[in-house]
Amino acid sequence: MKNIVEVRNVTKKFMGAKVLDDVSLQIRLGDKVAMMGPNGAGKTTLVRSILGFYHVDSGSIRVEGYDPIVARVDVLRHISFIPQLPPPVKLNISELLTYVERSTGTAKEEIVSQADAMELDVEKHMAKPFFKLSGGMKQKLLIAIALAKKSRLLVFDEPTANLDPKARDHFYRLLSSIDYDHSTIFITHRVEEIEGLANRKVYMDLGKVMEDEPI
Ligand SMILES: Nc1ncnc2c1ncn2[C@@H]1O[C@H](COP(=O)(O)OP(=O)(O)O)[C@@H](O)[C@H]1O
Ligand SMILES: [Mg+2]
């Protein structure tokens, strides 16, 4: 089967320092990857490179066959990404949902309903700027948007750091109820939390993939 993500011998440097060191990683449809490793291992840099946010110094990356830098808009339209830190969006919630609807074809109602399942009442906050929501509310809204998009590839960079235990449970329940073929990359420090949601563990350190095994 065709790989959704194909990373081949990628090296990425920041100011001369190798942050990704000859990384290769293939992700097939249905792979649920728990990506682990200490701070500074290069996890965020790797997923951001897969999303086309960075040019790499050598090697190649393909997402659904596309170069994520060349076909950035297409690639991003088909990926759901939750960053480690919520972006400083100035739009209010209503504007944000309209933007998402126009740029990705994701119905607002679907986002509202996903948010509802995490006990976030979006309707109540429509006029509020995104950046004024609490950390947990931002995270829930970003998750709701990510899930409502129904992407084949979902990328989560430590998505639960700001969530209370109950919200975390709601989130995991939503993730496990996705009923179409998809792949996930889930960066986490707590693999036991995503038991049942991951079928593969990739462990990174010092810019390299040190372990890659089924779980
Ligand atoms: N935009 C950047 N500019 C310079 N250095 C960076 C940048 N992003 C990450 N780094 C460095 O790259 C290394 C890997 O960071 P990162 O990919 O965020 O690791 P992880 O997500 O595994 O904690 C760290 O040493 C970090 O300081
Ligand atoms: Mg990180």
Image (cartoon, rainbow, N blue to C red):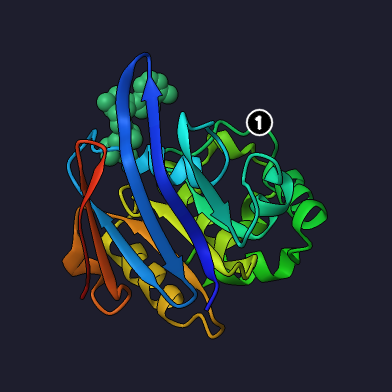
- Residue shown at 67%/46% (left/top)? 93
62 horizontally vs 36: left or right: right
- Residue shown at 30%/48% (left/top)? 161
- Name the quadrant containing residue 163: bottom left
- Name the quadrant containing residue 201: bottom left
Task: Say few, some or many: other residues with alpha carbon within 10 Å of mark 1 (under 14 / 14 to 19 / 20 or more).
Answer: few
**Residue type (three-letter) at the residue carrying disc 1:** Lys
Q: Nearer the viewer, residue 114 or 147?
A: 147
53 w.r.t. 181: above or below: above
Give the labeled residue for mark 1: 90
88 w.r.t. 100: above or below: above
Q: Is residue 121 visible?
A: no
Ligand 2's image quarter is top left
126 horizontally vs 115: left or right: right
Q: Residue 182's x, y, as percent?
A: 52, 75
Tally of marks: 1
Q: Is residue 124 visible?
A: yes
Q: Nearer the viewer, residue 162 or 178?
A: 178
